[in-house]
Image (spheres, grey):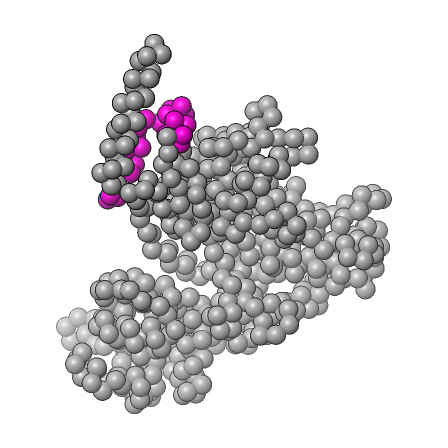
Amino acid sequence: MPTTAQMLAEYPLFLLEVLAELRSADVDGVRTREEAIEQLAPQLTEPTNVQMAYQDVVDDRPDAEEAVRLLLREHGELAEAQFSRQFGAIRHMGPAKLEREAPWLNPESIAELLYYYGLIGRGYKGAGEKAHTIIYLPSDITPWLPHPQSEAAASGLPLTPVAPPPVARQLLADDSFLNDAGTLLGFVRAERLRLTPQGPHPEDIDRLVQRFILPFRSDEPDLVVRLALLLHLANRMGWLRRDGDVVRLTGNRVSAFLEQPRPEQWRALFEAWRDSPEWNDLCRTPALECADTGSWKNDPLQTRRALLRLIGQLAPGYWYTQDDLIRAIRTVEPDFQRPTGNYDTWYIRNNSTNEFLKGFEQWDGVEGVLIRFLLRGPLYWLNVIDLAEPAAGDNLLLSLGRWGARWLGHDTPPPDAPPLHRITVAEDFTVTVPHTAPLAERFRVERFAEWQRSYPDYVYRITQRSLRRAVEGGITVAQIRQFLTGQGRQAPPRVLAALERFAVDDGEQAANKQ
């Protein structure tokens, strides 16, 4: 079946704008149909957007539910003649008539309602006497529609999905953790990360976290754990090595990671966390303290794998409440981290009350708190789940994201890659690197320019000091110039001339030293 982008190729530009308005999507600033399709298609295939559009249509015309069910039973497509007999036709109109009559305002059939909401398309199949038109569901939205089999049990856990939250309340997982991993690599390469007997030097850590997309202070517990996890994964993946009292990069492993496609980079980070026996999620949970008392010991690897198996039973794209998920886990597998069922010999303390939490009656205070932290912490940071704020209270909503679904065994389509925006060089010697730029590109910029800020884009400045550092690190001015003018980038003549002057001056200084 065609994808949403292929379906939209048949739409005139103004109809794409209409569809964007109906689906609460953004196409501001586009000038051509191609630009509109590139910007619109990823938004229309987001699971929540699909489900909200479907619910809007069904609320308006309940029979639309049966129309979608029929197409799903027929593997996503049906001859238009058959579909139209039951659900009406889609009137053929040219662009002028479409603009004049605006049929999306008063669709005459269920078919038209689904069509103008972008949930079905019209195409052609066969040749010669067998040629006929079909009605189809775009292939990249079918996983997010309510399949008949999923209505009976939308999840392997005993919990019921809730209505998709409004877009304004959604906290979709983004690339910030991965980008911060790139920031860490660039920082260690360009600056120094000193070591003390207690770990990295606090002053260096303070300078590092200011470069993160969301800089934080040392009194923000969740984000401190986020930093600790990032450093742990960097070490586990072999990026860092100790050289006396400073940290340096392991060049071959870092290069191999940076050159991977972004989806593979995400998967590598997720798997490093998933398979780490040293990272103890329970003892890193901010509200809890693992007391070094007695001979007890938990198995963080076994716990993590058990929870990922349970979370993998969620139906991709559906939304659930945090409290419902925790209740379901307590019902079906309460001993997910204590296979022997021993709740009396673990010394876990509540950080607020200093109370030791023993006995199964403290399950919510230990296991429940751990699950809550994993949901808002590592599972969210590593792109496994999406979150949404509740309408009231603190009962977060969550959804198994596209990457998380694939990593946990679901056969779902991967997310569309965000459009890449070019690195730009300005007259004032600043280099702007969008968050969507490949990590390898930003790492190269870090080698010859000084960091200025990280939001809304990364901004660096080429200075005499940064050029000197680059040359001392084995990078030539010719290589910097080639980077700034490569891949269609336009470097201002003023910047290129300054590079040439620096090269001449540097050469003269080197000759004088000889």
User: Does the magenta segment cover residue 35?
Assistant: no
Considering the image in quadrants, where does the N terminus appear? Answer: bottom left
Whole-percent x, y for residue 294 in the image: 85, 44
| Total count of labels | 0
165 on left or right of 459? right
Residue at (74% x, 58% y) in the render: 366
Residue lying furthest top: 514
Whole-percent x, y for residue 114 in the image: 34, 80
Considering the image in quadrants, where does the C terminus appear? Answer: top left
What is the magenta segment's predominant secondary structure? helix
**Highlighted range, magenta:** 465-490
Question: Front-most of 330 and 454?
Answer: 454
337 on left or right of 46? right
User: Does the magenta segment cover residue 481?
Assistant: yes
Whole-percent x, y for residue 266 in the image: 47, 48
Whole-percent x, y for residue 227 in the image: 59, 45
86 on left or right of 456? left
